[in-house]
Amino acid sequence: MSRARRRRRHGPAGRPSERNATVTEQADRAKGTERAAGGPGAERAPSVRWARRQRIVDAALAALERQPYEQIRIAELAQAAEVALGTLYRYFPSKEHLYAVVLQEWVERDRHRHRQTVPAPARRDRARSRIHAIIAAFERQPQFYRLTLLLSASTDPEVRALLAGADATATMLLAGDFAGMGVPAPRDRARMLYAISGSTLTGAVYHGRPFADAYRLADRFLDLCERRAEAARRP
């Protein structure tokens, strides 16, 4: 058979590679279509990434429940979470960043536990119930209060952004409770109550003063606010 006839039958040299490339492109397009349509591969990668990230957060939280923050080693957290050290750092570039996320996780879990175990308070008692729950959480696990103060001194922009967001949410919720009581300037009152509680918690956690002081002074402030609200409602 002549060379020209072989070329006509089989095509120019290199055509099989082009056909393979075309098959590969078609397979890639099919995968893309599958993801867009919600097929088997649609959520696999994001769910795996989320599960891996959550294992890291869980391992870090469990470590803080056992030992002080300063004694925790990132390499041990990676081992406990069953991820490579480089993988952990891809999710959390620094120890401070990781523990800012851990602190958020702990707050959410404790808030959920409180909602599940304590009946919903009356509108006028919501601020008292909320601040009591916060004090009780730090009384049970004072290492998380120490972590809060330690991270508040961080210069890491990611950490500062996470803490600022958490502070804004906490202030908004407590201000909403004060507004429900009819207290004037509810946002200012929320900040005042957090400042009082922060001072008494620091005394309890770092200087051995009774946690009862934190509850007592928070209650005194709330009693004053309630009287102010009642006076404002009088004709």
Image: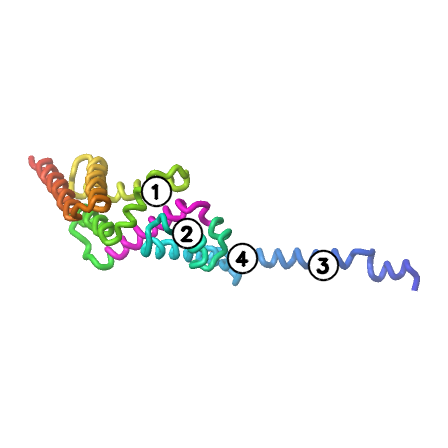
- Residue named by callout 4: 35
Q: Please state which of the two labelled residues, at mark 1 or mark 3, is closer to the viewer.
A: 1
What is the CA distance from the residue labelled 3 to the residue labelled 4?
A: 23 Å
Residue at figure coordinates x 40%, y 48% from the top left: 98
Tag 3–tag 4 contact (CB < 8 Å): no
Mark linked to residue 73: 2
Name the residue at 15% across, 51% down: 122
* Secondary structure mostly seen in the magenta stretch: helix
Mark 1 residue crowding within 10 angstroms, few (<14) / some (14–19) / many (20+): some
Name the amino acid, label 3: Asn
- Relative placement, left or right, of 87 versus 201 is right
Question: Which secondary structure lies at badge 1?
Answer: helix
- Checking the image for residue 20, the label placed there is 3
Q: Are marks 4 and 1 in contact (CB under 8 Å)?
A: no
Query: In this rendering, which labeled residue sits more in front, label 3 or label 2?
Result: 2
Residue 179 appearing in the image: no
Magenta span contains residue 106 = yes
Mark 1 or mark 2: which comes first in sequence?
2
x, y percentage for residue 82? 46, 60
Q: CA distance from mark 1 to mark 2?
A: 17 Å
Q: CA distance from mark 1 to mark 3?
A: 55 Å
Q: Crowding at label 3, few (<14), some or many (≥20) Cα neighbours within 10 Å? A: few
State which quadrant residue 53 falls in. Answer: bottom left
Quadrant (top left, top right, bottom left, bottom right) of the N terminus: bottom right
Which residue is under mark 1?
151
Magenta highlight range: 91-114
* Residue type at tag 1: Leu
Label 2 environment density (alpha carbons within 10 Å; few <14, some 14–19, many ≥20): few
Disc 4 crowd rating (10 Å Cα; few below 14, some 14-19, many 20+) is: some
Give the spatial CA distance, label 4 vs label 2.
38 Å
